[in-house]
Amino acid sequence: MNELVKQITDLVRSQGLLMKSARQIENNSDNIKVKPGDANFVTVYDEAVQNNLIKGLKEILPNALFFAEEKDNSSVDTTRGHCFIIDPIDGTTNFIHDMGASAISVGLFLDGKPYIGVIYDPYRDEMFYAQTGFGAFLNGTRINCSDRTLDKALFSFGSAPYNKSTLGSEAFSLAQKLFYKTADIRRSGSAAIDIACVACGRTDAFFEPVLSPWDYAAGITILTEASAAVSDFNGNNLSLSIPSSFLCSNRVIYRELLNLIQEED
Ligand code: LIP
């Protein structure tokens, strides 16, 4: 493992331990704040993990910029130099409900190009990481996406919970359509975990009508290095600065999925 990847994964693992130490978050309202949108929360742990990550990553790469879920990113140009795009706890609602299905997601970009991606699920002690050109790994073992066909595929989807009123029906109508063409559906409640599952071939596709760059930044590098396809619903590259629709899948079914999505419009 490259030294920079090792430094980042060590730091991320330490923050996973902080996540796991959290107890009964839901029972203390001082722990939770409500953000704009439907059912959008932040906990004191999201803020602590984010602060600790930024502090530690600054020691590793002093000139890097930071674009992260729980901070103001208005002056951050994600396309210049080293830029970390961070979701301190992806799956915050799961975290509040003690579901044991949340992850830390850290993507590093160099001049706007994918460089390193790290997704850590502390509950399963699963560290997914990739560096452009060097493959994708889960706990040190090389991973690749699946080659299942659509009829055998297991897909997951995100319900766009923060935009229920505008995008909820799109998410469910597409999920219903895919349900009849595939083996079955899953919904983990963490986009980062759903993405990691496509990268290692547990599932075959994941979509959500809108996600933010911190939800998928690390995933872009991991998916690409695992030979999966990743784009927005129009087949375009994902934005690193504004929310976007999101699709990833193995390459056998990607075009078919894009066509099915476009039929919906
Ligand atoms: C959330 C996800 C969830 C997805 C939401 C949101 P957060 O991230 O991982 O699965 O449906 O759109 O992005 O806010 O918990 O970091």
Image (cartoon, rainbow, N blue to C red):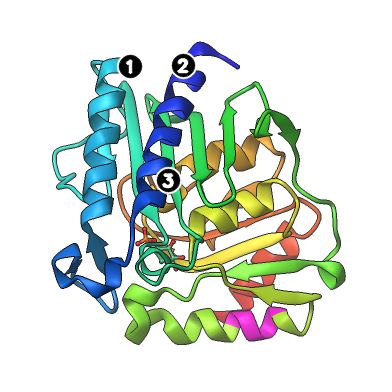
Disc on the earlier residue, 1 or 3: 1
Label pair 1/2, CB-CB below 8 angstroms: yes
Disc on the earlier residue, 1 or 2: 2
Label pair 1/3, CB-CB below 8 angstroms: no
Residue wearing tag 3: 104
Residue 139 location in percent, x, y? Answer: 65, 33
Mark carried by residue 60? 1
CA separation in Å, label 1 and label 3: 18 Å
Determine whether the residue tagged by mark 1 lies in a helix, strand or loop. helix
What range is drawn magenta here?
174-178
Question: In terms of image quadrants, where is residue 140?
Answer: top right
Ligand 1 shows up in the quarter that is bottom left
Instruction: Report whether 66 appears left or right of 263.
Output: left
Residue wearing tag 2: 4
CA separation in Å, label 3 and label 2: 17 Å
Q: Is residue 128 above or below residue 43?
A: above
Crowd band around label 3 with a 10 angstrom C-alpha radius: few (<14), some (14–19), many (20+):
many
Circle 3: residue type: Ile
Circle 1: residue type: Ile
Residue 216 location in percent, x, y? Answer: 46, 49
x 28%, y 79%: residue: 38
- Please check the rendered image and state whether residue 6 is part of the magenta-colored stretch, yes or no: no
x 34%, y 68%: residue: 96
CA separation in Å, label 1 and label 2: 8 Å
Crowd band around label 1 with a 10 angstrom C-alpha radius: few (<14), some (14–19), many (20+):
some
Residue lying at the far top in this picture: please name it: 3
Crowd band around label 2 with a 10 angstrom C-alpha radius: few (<14), some (14–19), many (20+):
few
Disc on the earlier residue, 3 or 2: 2
Quarter occupied by the N terminus: top right
Label pair 3/2, CB-CB below 8 angstroms: no
x 46%, y 57%: residue: 102
Nearest the camera: 99 or 240?
99
